[in-house]
Image (cartoon, helix red, strand yellow):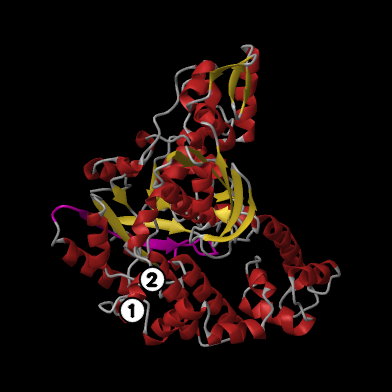
Amino acid sequence: MTNRSIAKLFEETAELLELQGANPFRIRAYRNAAKSVLDLSEALSDLAQRSDVDLTKISGIGKDIAFKIHQLLEDGTFPLLEELREEFPADLLKILRLPGVGPKKARVLYDELSIQSVDDLKAAAQAGKVAELKGFGKKTEQSILAGLEELAEEETRFLISTARESADAIVESLQQLEEVKHAMVAGSCRRRKETCGDLDVLVTTSDPEAAMECLATHERVEKVLQRGETKQRVKLDSGIELDLRVVPPESYGAALQYFTGSKEHNIVIRRRAQDRGYKLNEYGLYDGDRLVAGKTEEEVYAAVDLPWIPPELRENRGEIELAEQGKLPELLTLADIRGDLHMHTTATDGTASIREMIEGARERGLEYIAITDHSQRVSMANGLDANRLRAHWKEIRKIREEYSDIEVLCGIECDILEDATMDLPDDVLAEGDWVIAVLHYGLRQPREQIMKRLLNAVKNPYVSLIGHPCGRLVGRRSAADVNFPELFKAAADHGVMMEINANPHRLDLDDIQAAAAKDHGIPIVINTDAHSPENLDLMEFGVDQARRAGLSSADVANTRAFREFRKLIRNHD
């Protein structure tokens, strides 16, 4: 079993325990275990077989969880999970993801209306039965119906992190075959979209059967759905389906361009080919029956009088015109990032100490970081009140004196409360080096109140950054109703920066709003929101989002040397 599949089963256990109304500490143990397993750099199945490895030494894994890991690796499940699955219908877990429906309400739906599936829930809501339940009402019922529509669409798509991990595993195996010359993922995964419906992998090889067999027998493949001589479709253990296509070497570039998309981008490219008397398809660019270009993407674009366009920009949002004018941006790279200004420690809901987070940042070559644990409103994460925060900052200041090669800022992720005040008083915020203001609660408030909260935060003289500005969770929670033009104007006027949160579940700002923030002259800060040293590696997803927005290193604040970055912080020393 892969780390991801093990973590998924622990997360399922936690959700089912929530439905059961189990002890919160027991639920948290499984959630922490899921997070720890995902953070491992080695396969847990390999670690469990080694006599020199004690699984209980891994953060978040105690004796009971370690025992269940061995059961999972041997049987693919464990008794508690099977008992919970028998107690509740599987669709209740999907219902938990709907806006306004937590474990308690899901249990009420199950107990009072005998809801067994999303179809049952849809029928009950359409009949007005949900609104009649205590604690629900018409507004919640309408929210559930809207959420069910989104859920139907989201179930066919996967986070870019899941898609990337799956695709990379397959491509790496194919590239190791001596017969394979090229192997690359295409489609929305190559364009680094937030979610992917499926995966396309293209290869050139002297032995198509070897490539087909490599995929069919791959450890990540759950089921072969269709297999031919040059095309195979499989379902992976992540749930995502993948198409492998073997293409001739002379068509590889044309096929890569075609299958990378987007559809809108490709329509324009094909039209340009037609305007020049050519025909362009996945096999190449032709002048009549003569192949003019197709071996590489570069020669395909050159044939229609364009430079090569980075995949992340291929959405027909002006990239063609920029390419014509020779004004394509030099996109940001991961190597450009020098700092990470949003992370958590064991002081709240992180899994590592201050020193461990600093060491993790140093190992990744970062020059500066900010430790930004939660404020008190986030009680489920053991958020910090004024006294605990001051003691936390005192400890950070003491520890950072030990390091001469990295700057460590005393920060806080401070909630903007539902009444539009800050979660901590100004005299406390004034003592910090770096203040991130965020929305965590009340995301369904009307636009007027959401904007009052955000604008009050922007005007607060101690706020440095608006973190994950719309509060969405990709595929799980809709965004707050934010008037972005109004927010960006205020941020530009007051010198407040905007975040691209690199966590694949957030990616907030999205690519369109990040581009709009750039147009307002607002410095963007890409942060990982790391809860462990391993989470610091999520930075690449934020960089990908920035690239889709057309951002260069000059547009991103944390590409600057620390002295220059510091100048961007309001009230900097």
Disc with the residue nearer the chain's start (1 vs 2): 2
Residue appearing at x 33%, y 78% in the figure: 55
Q: What secondary structure is marked by label 2?
A: helix
Residue 219 in picture, x, y percent from top left: 48, 61
Which residues lie in the magenta part? 404-426
Q: Is residue 310 magenta?
A: no
Residue appearing at x 40%, y 58% in the figure: 529
Q: Nearer the viewer, residue 10 or 139?
A: 10
Q: What secondary structure is marked by label 1?
A: helix
Residue 120 in picture, x, y percent from top left: 79, 72
Numbered circle sitting on residue 55: 1
Residue appearing at x 47%, y 32% in the figure: 310
Q: Is residue 417 magenta?
A: yes
**Inter-mark Cα distance, 1 to 2:** 9 Å
Q: Are marks 1 and 2 in contact (CB under 8 Å)?
A: yes
Residue appearing at x 18%, y 61% in the figure: 400
Instruction: Find disc 2 in the rendering and name its residue.
Output: 44
- Give above or below for 266 relative to 376: above
Which quadrant of the structure image shows residue 22?
A: bottom right
